[in-house]
Image (cartoon, helix red, strand yellow):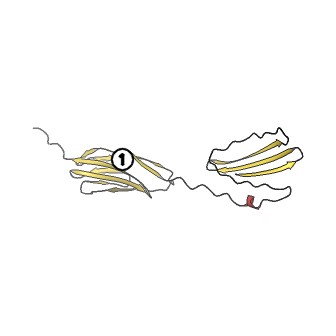
Amino acid sequence: MKLKMRYFGTVMLVAISVVCATGSGFAQIGVPCGADSEMTGPRFSAGATASLNILRENETDSAAEQEEPSAPPAPVELVIDQAPNSLKIGEEAPIFYTLRNASADAVIEWRSSNETVAVVDSEGKVRAISPGNVEITAAIGEAKSSALITVTEIAAESV
């Protein structure tokens, strides 16, 4: 936030420019200067940091030409929303997930903890191979999420 104040007789002109993660804004407020003066205008959230540059008339603000530091990007979030609890040998099922704050070209890496029990393809589809328990993990950078799946035998049919 930059705040510029200029005094013009009985009015103090206050110019406020704000840059935040959700966008930027500008407000200009005329404040009467007298014993009963009160300033009303935009409110900023608690805990926000601000710098104040008070300039004399005809003085330039060299800091105004410097770019405000941008907020760090939000961390990538990856959550497995739905996965099968169990599969029978030979069955296939997709794993559904939610991915937030990732670039459009982000690639999820899928892994099986035991490829003799089940394998997972690059789209998150699991194929059961043999009886056992397996953990399927989706990862993108530091973000990871896992699902546990039990693979069971195909039940023998009654004759």
Q: Residue at x 36, y 47 (%)?
A: 95
Would residue 133 be found to the left or right of residue 82 on screen?
left
Q: Residue at x 17, y 42 (%)?
A: 155
Residue 65 spot, x, y in % from top left: 74, 60
Q: Residue at x 83, y 59 (%)?
A: 59
Sort mark 1 into few (<14), some (14-19) or many (20+) by Cα contacts within 10 Å.
some
Would residue 94 be found to the left or right of residue 66 on screen?
left
Asked whether 42 or 138 is in front, the reply is 42
Asked whether 110 or 57 is in front, the reply is 57
Would residue 27 be found to the left or right of residue 134 on screen?
right
Residue 136 spot, x, y in % from top left: 33, 52
In the picture of the structure, the residue carrying the numbered disc 1 is: 95
Q: Residue at x 20, y 50 (%)?
A: 131
Asked whether 120 or 49 is in front, the reply is 49
Helix, strand or loop at mark 1? loop
Residue 75 spot, x, y in % from top left: 50, 53
Check the image and name the residue furthest to the left. Answer: 159
Given the image, on which type of amino acid does mark 1 rest? Ile
User: Image quadrant of residue 72?
Assistant: bottom right
User: Image quadrant of residue 69?
Assistant: bottom right
Residue 140 spot, x, y in % from top left: 43, 56
Asked whether 106 or 22 is in front, the reply is 22
Tell me the quadrant of the picture where the C terminus can be found. Answer: top left
